[in-house]
Amino acid sequence: MELLGDFGFYIPLVLIALIFLMAAIKILREYERGVVFTLGRFTGVKGPGLIILIPFVQQMVRIDLRTIVLDVPTQDVISRDNVSVKVNAVLYFRVIAPDLATIQVENFMQATSELAQTTLRSVLGKHELDEMLSERDKLNSDIQEILDAQTDAWGIKVANVEIKHVDIDESMVRAIAKQAEAERERRAKVINAEGEQQAAQKLLEAAEILGQRPEAMQLRYLSTLNVIANERSSTIVFPFPLDLMDLVKSSKPRV
């Protein structure tokens, strides 16, 4: 009975020691850091590995340093040409200064998410719909630079921003299709006109070359007759000299 009484005296002390050790010893993983406060004042960043705190005097806030993937909710955006679209994006960032991420902002995850949403609406609202669809790389870079500059004071590094979807109203899709069709028709007409212009230029150059010697025109006539004969055509073409036409016109009596 006396032995049990002695052990009963030490049991509370052992429990207190265990609780003290559990509160004092902390283990941080390789990707974690601990922001330590002593009596409410910031005293440093510790980790990774085993660290020892003074219970009830020091407190620690764990911060994850791995890259965080944040899905930016769908935002209603009105483009510069007054087209309403729905846009969502994904944001990649990580904490590079655990002390700033803990002290300078209450909840860096929520703060970064809200900032990403407002920046997405602000940047895309300055561009037209065609730019949103064709220049995503440039828009991603612009949004990333703005977010990185604004979150630098929070100890956060924004590595990348990617616009995932740009959803357009069905009526606007039909309008864009008509615009694309009209653009293709315009290009076809321009290409056809450019071809006619180039052909006319070549014909003019050929006429200038043939006009230098009358014999060249006669040889051209004979070459054309040879081509027609080889095609087994029933049409017979007789070349009519232009000089003879001028002679006939000049011989007509004037009234």
Image (cartoon, helix red, strand yellow):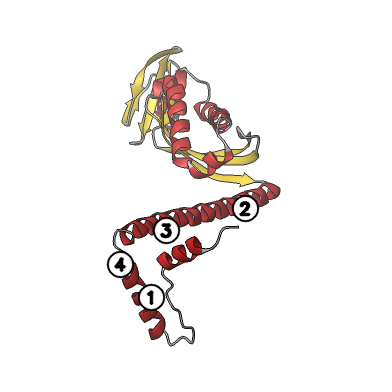
Q: Residues within 10 Å of mark 3 (few under 14, many from 20)?
A: few
The residue indicated by pointer 4 is 216
Q: Residues within 10 Å of mark 1 (few under 14, many from 20)?
A: few
Amino acid residing under circle 4 = Ala
Which numbered disc flags the more N-terminal residue, 1 or 3? 3
Against 55, residue 25 (above or below) is below
**Residue at x 56%, y 51% (from the top left corner):** 186
- Looking at the rendered structure, the kind of residue marked 1 is Thr
Gap in angstroms between the C-alphas marked 1 and 4:
12 Å
Q: Secondary structure at mark 4?
A: helix
Image point (50%, 44%), residue name: 134
Query: Disc 2 residue type?
Result: Ala
Where is mark 1, residue-wise? 224
Looking at the picture, how far across and down is residue 129, in whole percent?
A: 58, 40
Q: Secondary structure at mark 1?
A: helix
Left or right relative to 209: residue 71: right
- Between marks 2 and 1, how big is the CA–CA gap? 47 Å
Say which of marks 2 and 1 sits in front.
1
Residue lying farthest right?
171
Residue picked out by circle 2: 177
